[in-house]
């Protein structure tokens, strides 16, 4: 297994962080760092001596300095028993890699500590070294919960290390920067611990607002959301999935309901669902107290590859799709492939168009892999998110390169609106991509062979039956109202080659000459 990030082991005294970390590092042939030992090496004093001489606040400052001084290459790092009490230490650990919490029963911890001669000032109580353990566990419940994964620390160190490896190996972490803000994107399977971990890290002091897609199977909703009310004051609202939830009336209903339940700037909004629900959740977060924090749990391919990444959020208006919105990125995005198991074949296929689109924009190998496999996998999602994050970082607020992400969307959105949103987003974008391929062949230098490859490749993703000729005509009217156009023409993203998208201005006659023959065909 090739690890791409660091793994941090957290948990209470006696849970085995150092022993398990040593074993895990040996298994993975990685460096191992024990943070307590790093502090000792940096200061010349043991953590017990520093706590006794300087107090806990100063010790936590020294501990953070030792953590920040560690190299950032892949490694296994055992944190101190109280490291995650510090928000700064939590942020530093999360910025570097995966935080795994080890847990064990009180009896196990007491038995191990009874055999351990390490001096632990924070556990000493009237001469009993484990006298305060139960109290310590209680007071640190939230910090021990501020993890991405939870693993049982019971049993032999080798068995515990194997359990950590099985969970941590197939997990990916990426950062998507929007200006000064950075979203942490965690990808894998079975990530429900990470949702509670994100909330524990952020420690909201007002009501947590949970907006969930009613179309997500109830078992998966409960798996993710069931523990939140027991840990935080919570207001939960089920939303209808799809574009019908992105309305002024729904936005008002949710904002008013959240405020009445005590939400505000100090809240965290959790959005769980497809792209439309995440759009609404993000916009709600941006409005509460002029900006509450946000965690997104995308449950469809479309939402995982696109809607949850980059901070754009909007609702629909009578004039068209996504015409009233904002930029409000999430603190955390949890991309759990387990959600995809319940999707219909049609919905899965529709979402794949967003990954395919990223390949057409910047990676021809990704485009061809999606065409070949016709399935979202961890590697393809990871690559699509990586490509989108790079574009967003270069152009956070869509004044330049970020417009490349509109490939196929200007035409696709017009079709969606013209169909009254009965046409799936991915299917509409696939039709837009087919038109763009033809337009690129005529005006941007795309080769005949590559135009044929695109046209043949996306055939599987087109809607059946196709939109009516009347729908295409209405779409052309909507297209002429697009914010990127004027009386003479519109700026579109064209394809001089596969994997090399570029911005081009084209006339309405050129667009219509490509657009209407496709819509009027009997294919």
Image (cartoon, helix red, strand yellow):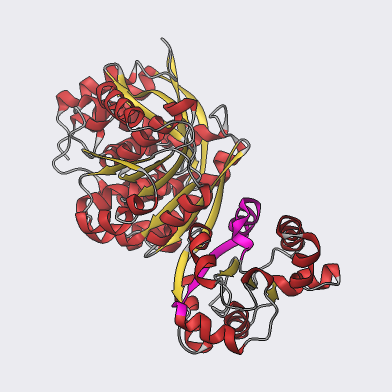
When the figure is inspected, residue 333 is found, relative to residue 220, above or below; the finding is: above
Q: Is residue 91 left or right of residue 430?
A: right
Q: Nearer the viewer, residue 333 or 376?
A: 333
When the figure is inspected, residue 91 is found, relative to residue 244, above or below; the finding is: below
The magenta span reads 82-106
Residue 313 at x, y percent in the picture: 41, 32
Q: Quadrant of residue 320?
A: top left
Count of all numbered marks drawn on residues in the image: 0
Q: Is residue 273 magenta?
A: no
Q: Is residue 83 magenta?
A: yes
Q: Residue furthest top?
A: 487
Residue 513 at x, y percent in the picture: 32, 24
Query: Is residue 352 visible to us here?
Result: no
When the figure is inspected, residue 109 is found, relative to residue 263, above or below; the finding is: below
Rendered residue at 15%/44% (across/down) = 464
Residue 164 at x, y percent in the picture: 49, 76
Q: Nearer the viewer, residue 154 or 318?
A: 154
Q: Residue furthest front?
A: 126
Residue 374 at x, y percent in the picture: 31, 59
Query: Is residue 471 visible to us here?
Result: yes
Q: Is residue 460 left or right of residue 159?
A: left
Q: For the C terminus, give its image quadrant.
A: top left
């Amino acid at each position: 297994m090739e690890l791409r990030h660091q793994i941090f082991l957290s948990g209470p005294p006696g849970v085995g962080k150092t022993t398990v970390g040593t074993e895990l590092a040996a298994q993975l042939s990685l460096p191992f760092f024990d943070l307590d030992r790093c502090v000792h090496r940096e200061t010349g004093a043991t953590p017990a001596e520093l706590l006794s001489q300087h107090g806990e606040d100063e010790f936590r400052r020294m501990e953070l300095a030792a953590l920040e001084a560690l190299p950032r290459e892949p490694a296994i790092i055992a944190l101190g028993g109280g490291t995650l009490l510090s928000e700064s230490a939590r942020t530093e650990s999360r910025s570097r890699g995966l935080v795994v919490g080890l847990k064990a029963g009180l009896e196990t911890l007491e038995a191990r500590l009874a055999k351990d001669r390490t001096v632990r000032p924070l556990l000493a109580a009237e001469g009993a070294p484990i006298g305060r353990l139960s109290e310590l566990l209680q007071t640190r419940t939230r910090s021990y919960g501020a993890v991405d994964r939870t693993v049982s620390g019971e049993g032999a160190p080798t068995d515990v290390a194997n359990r950590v490896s099985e969970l941590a190996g197939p997990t990916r972490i990426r950062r998507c920067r929007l200006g000064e803000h950075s979203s942490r994107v965690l990808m894998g399977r079975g990530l429900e611990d990470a949702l509670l971990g994100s909330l524990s890290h952020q420690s909201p002091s007002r009501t947590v607002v949970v907006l969930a897609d009613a179309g997500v199977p109830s078992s998966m909703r409960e798996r993710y959301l069931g523990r939140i009310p027991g840990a935080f004051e919570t207001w939960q609202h089920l939303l209808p999935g799809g574009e019908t939830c992105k309305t002024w009336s729904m936005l008002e209903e949710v904002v008013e309901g959240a405020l009445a339940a005590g939400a505000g700037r100090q809240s965290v909004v959790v959005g769980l669902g497809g792209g439309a629900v995440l759009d609404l959740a993000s916009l709600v977060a941006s409005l509460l107290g002029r900006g509450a924090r946000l965690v997104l749990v995308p449950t469809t391919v479309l939402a995982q590859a696109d809607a949850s990444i980059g901070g754009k959020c909007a609702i629909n208006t009578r004039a068209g799709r996504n015409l009233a919105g904002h930029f409000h990125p999430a603190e955390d995005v949890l991309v759990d492939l387990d959600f995809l198991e319940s999707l219909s074949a049609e919905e899965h296929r529709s979402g794949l168009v967003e990954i395919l689109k990223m390949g057409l924009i910047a990676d021809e190998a990704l485009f061809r892999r999606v065409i070949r496999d016709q399935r979202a996998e961890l590697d393809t999602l990871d690559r699509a998110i990586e490509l989108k994050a790079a574009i967003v970082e270069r152009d956070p607020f869509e004044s330049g390169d970020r417009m490349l992400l509109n490939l196929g969307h200007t035409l696709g959105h017009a079709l969606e609106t013209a169909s009254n949103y009965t046409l799936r987003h991915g299917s509409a974008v696939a039709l837009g991509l087919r038109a763009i391929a033809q337009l690129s062949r005529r005006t941007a230098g795309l080769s005949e062979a590559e135009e044929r490859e695109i046209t043949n490749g996306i055939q599987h993703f087109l809607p059946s039956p196709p939109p009516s000729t009347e729908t295409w005509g209405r779409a052309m009217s909507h297209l002429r109202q697009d914010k990127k156009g004027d009386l003479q023409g519109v700026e579109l993203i064209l394809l001089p080659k596969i994997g090399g998208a570029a911005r081009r201005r084209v006339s309405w006659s050129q667009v219509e000459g490509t657009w209407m023959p496709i819509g009027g065909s009997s294919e």
